[in-house]
Image (cartoon, grey):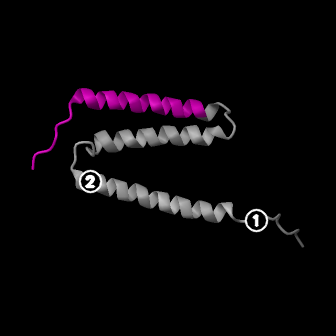
Amino acid sequence: MSGHIVSIKSYLAVFAALMVLTVATILVATIDLGPMNIVVALLVAAVKATLVVLIFMHARFSGRLVALSIFAGLLWLAILVGLTLTDYLTRHWTPAPPPF
């Protein structure tokens, strides 16, 4: 089986992008954006994970079965996060009972 050969130039470009995004993650952690800190940090993490999966794991040049597996994994993750959020968002939070 012959695979797609990715050039060293592509690897270095993705590595540089990952380093820039790592610096962006550090900067986001030091800046107070209020409730948007988590959103921006997760967005940067998702971009970094996408770069790693597409380039370093060669998913970009793989067949449809690999794409289907990635889609199924992301769908399952969305289902689990959605079910967790439905439980979390529908709870009626009450204060803790006083100590004895």
Whether residue 26 sits left or right of residue 51 in the image: it is: right
Q: Amino acid at mark 1?
A: His
User: Which residues, given as a range, are shown in magenta?
Assistant: 1-28
Alpha-carbon span between mark 2 and mark 1: 42 Å
- Label 1 packing within 10 angstroms: few (<14), some (14-19), many (20+): few
Residue 60 placement (x, y as % from top left): 27, 42
Residue 18 placement (x, y as % from top left): 41, 33
Q: Earlier in the sequence, mark 2 or mark 1?
A: 2
Residue 84 placement (x, y as % from top left): 58, 63
Whether residue 5 sits left or right of residue 81 in the image: it is: left
User: Furthest-bottom residue in view?
Assistant: 100
Q: Nearer the viewer, residue 7 or 99?
A: 7
| Residue 8 location, quadrant | top left
Q: Is residue 5 magenta?
A: yes
Is the stretch drawn in magenta largely helix, strand or loop? helix
Residue ID at (47%, 33%): 22
Residue ID at (31%, 42%): 54
Work out whether 62 lies above or below 90. above
Q: Amino acid at mark 2?
A: Val
| Residue 41 location, quadrant | top right
Work out whether 87 lies above or below 46. below
- Label 2 packing within 10 angstroms: few (<14), some (14-19), many (20+): some
User: Dot 1: what SS?
Assistant: loop
Pointer 1: what residue? 92
Q: Is residue 27 magenta?
A: yes
Which part of the image, by quadrant, shows the C terminus?
Answer: bottom right
Do labels 2 and 1 touch, CB within 8 Å? no
Residue ID at (61%, 63%): 86
User: Dot 2: what SS?
Assistant: helix
Work out whether 28 lies above or below 64. above
Residue ID at (69%, 37%): 34
Pointer 2: what residue? 66
